[in-house]
Amino acid sequence: MSGAISPDNDGFIGRWTILEPISKPNRSNTVFTDSYLNHVLDSVYFKGQMTVIPRDGDKVKVDGKKLMWHSLDSKLYNVKLYRFAAALKKPVYGIIFWAVTVIDCPEDMEGVRLSAGSNSASKWWLDGEEILMLSGDRRMVADNAASRPLTLTKGKHVLRCAVINGPGMSDFCVRFIDNDGHPVKNISISNQ
């Protein structure tokens, strides 16, 4: 997947490079408190976790196992992580997914917010800075939480997320919205 694409008609970001799931057994999603997520999702699982912009087919070692990055374009507004893992014959429960995308802004954009939904909990970083956390046992709902107002400067920005789930489905959706809650669509999305 070379080149850049636009968000969908509602501004949702569909181009991602996703790491095969990392094993993190949890019998219940009720443990996903802020303190638990800060401990687990801020832990380092692989080299370059917060700096690398992975390419399709790149591999990292996590707990002695090699996991591969896969680039994809979601045909829906959300990215179905459960189906992603199942299609690769990887674990679908008790896992952490890492996903990375690159946003290119044609101009400075002030007062935008990252608006996300995830199943179950998730954490979001923009250019290495944590900007949003969705804690608790939750279903994926579009615009379930939004970051503080952000300024996206002209140029490229790296957006990362980690989604954790015990039992149940796993997916996420994300977009940027303006001060009035309208989707930001004049950005491009790429893997590099």
Image: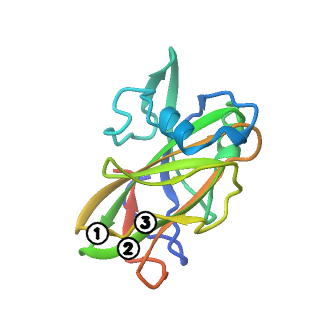
Q: Residues within 10 Å of mark 2 (few under 14, many from 20)?
A: many
Mark positioned earlier in the residue sequence (3 or 1): 3
The extreme bottom residue here reads 180
Neighbourhood count class around disc 3 (C-alpha, 10 Å): few under 14, some 14–19, many 20 upward: some
Q: Amino acid at mark 3?
A: Ile
Looking at the image, residue 100 sits to the left or right of residue 116; the answer is left
Task: Name the residue: 56% across, 34% down.
Answer: 20
Q: Secondary structure at mark 3?
A: loop
Q: Is residue 169 left or right of residue 102?
A: right
Q: Which residue is mark 1?
A: 151
Residue drawn at (75%, 36%) of the image = 28
Tag 3 residue: 5
Q: Amino acid at mark 2?
A: Val
Read off the residue under disc 2.
112
How far is mark 1 from mark 2, CA to CA?
6 Å
- Look at the numbered disc 1 and give the secondary structure of its residue: strand
Q: Nearer the viewer, residue 71 or 81?
A: 81
User: What x and y, as percent, mark residue 113?
Assistant: 42, 69
Q: Label 1 amino acid?
A: Thr
N-term mark: 3 or 2? 3
**Label annotation for residue 54:** none
Q: Are marks 1 and 2 in contact (CB under 8 Å)?
A: yes
Asked whether residue 87 appears in the rendered view, the answer is no
Among numbered discs 1 and 2, the one appearing first in the sequence: 2
Asked whether 10 or 87 is in front, the reply is: 10
Q: Quadrant of residue 180?
A: bottom left
